[in-house]
Image: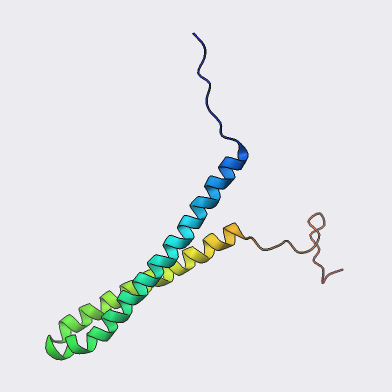
Amino acid sequence: MRGFVAFIPPPSALLLAFCRAMLYYMIMFNALRIICSVISALAVAACIFIFVYLGTLWGIVTLAVAAAFFGLTMLFRSLAINEEQKMNPLPAKGDFITGKRDEDK
């Protein structure tokens, strides 16, 4: 009986899968950011009417919901920025051997 031979995909296939996953996360984070910001804006707009017609307690609850969705908007924004920076890192500046920057020379 022959031994088990594991299939190892070529590096180009792994890179393609990684790029697809990163693109998926970037699109997902941006879509979630837009959805959460719309929900937050609608909650703030409805808050005025809720304060008038339903009372202070429900108005405060609506403000808390709006603040929570605004927080999610900022979270998804930071996650999208981090994923974009992973895909496109900043170019290195200076000499990597001595650690001196171009301005120090």
Q: In the image, is 45 to the left or to the right of 33?
A: left
Identify the colour scheme used: rainbow
- Choose between 57 and 11: the one closer to the eye: 11
Q: In the image, is 98 to the left or to the right of 58?
A: right
Work out whether residue 48 can be spotted.
Answer: yes
Outermost residue toward the right in this view: 105
Q: Is 16 rendered above or below residue 44?
A: above
Residue at 81% in and 54% down: 97
Quarter of the figure that contains the C terminus: bottom right
- Choose between 38 and 55: the one closer to the eye: 38
Residue at 16% in and 91% down: 52
Percent x, y of residue 4: 50, 18
Residue at 12% in and 85% down: 54
Percent x, y of residue 61: 21, 78
Percent x, y of residue 26: 48, 61
Q: In the image, is 34 to the left or to the right of 17?
A: left
Q: Quadrant of residue 64?
A: bottom left
Outermost residue toward the bottom in this view: 52
Work out whether residue 67 can be spotted.
Answer: no
Percent x, y of residue 77: 46, 69
Residue at 82% in and 68% down: 102
